[in-house]
Image: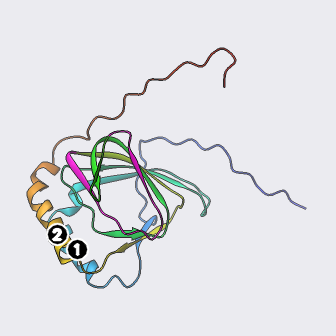
Amino acid sequence: MSTPSRPRLTLFRAEGAPLREDMMYFAQDQGDALRRIQNANEAGFGDGHALTCLYRSPDPKGVSLCWGWFRPGYITPRHSHDADCIYYLLGGTLQVGATVLGQGDGVFVPASATYTLTAGPEGAQLLEFRNATHFDVSLAAGGEGHWAKLLEAVQANHPRWTDGSPPPGPQVHATALPPGGH
């Protein structure tokens, strides 16, 4: 009888950690929404964000961790995923619904929840934790007003998206443990 393999300690580094194309994919039957996102990309939408996958478990049922930078005024399309996600804001501001999050804030987005995110005037630097190594993107149907707002944001902010750097990240202040403390 063989012993099941146990997960091993895995180190990762930020350098050379590309977002894998086979990690996030568009769900089937997106209809008109795919045409709309293609139109937005032609207008420069893709320049409004950068994502890097820092860690992706080799186990298909594992987890993933990505770093993201949403440039000033960037708006995500209304969408959902088939995996849970936690966004943790490292710097800048991020609007989720009517709530504005700042450095150190976060949001849990359960699988299948439809949402949109809007970066503030400095942009938003964030970490994205998922309980999956592969997940889909389902663009929300309809929403003429949302797509118009997204395209307006691209046109208004695109000139600022080609320059600059992410907003500053957190200042970490470690507290020393007492001798023998854990």
Q: Which residue is mark 2?
A: 42
The amino acid type of the residue labelled 1 equals Gln
Dot 1 surroundings within 10 Å: few (below 14), some, or many (20 or more)? few
Residues drawn in magenta = 103-122
Q: Is residue 117 above or below residue 123?
A: below
Considering depth in this image, is 113 or 9 the residue closer to the camera?
113
Q: Secondary structure at mark 1?
A: helix
In the picture as drawn, the residue positioned furthest to the right comes out as: 1
Q: Position of residue 19 (x, y in %)?
A: 40, 56
Horizontal arrangement in the rendering, residue 20 relative to residue 177 (left or right): left
Quarter of the C terminus within the rendering: top right
In the picture as drawn, the residue positioned furthest to the top comes out as: 179
Q: Is residue 132 above or below residue 92?
A: below
* Residue 104, quarter of the rendered image: top left
The amino acid type of the residue labelled 2 equals Glu
Horizontal arrangement in the rendering, residue 59 relative to residue 87 (left or right): right
* Residue 177, quarter of the rendered image: top right
Q: Which residue is mark 1?
A: 38
Dot 2 surroundings within 10 Å: few (below 14), some, or many (20 or more)? few
Q: Position of residue 172 (x, y in %)?
A: 42, 27
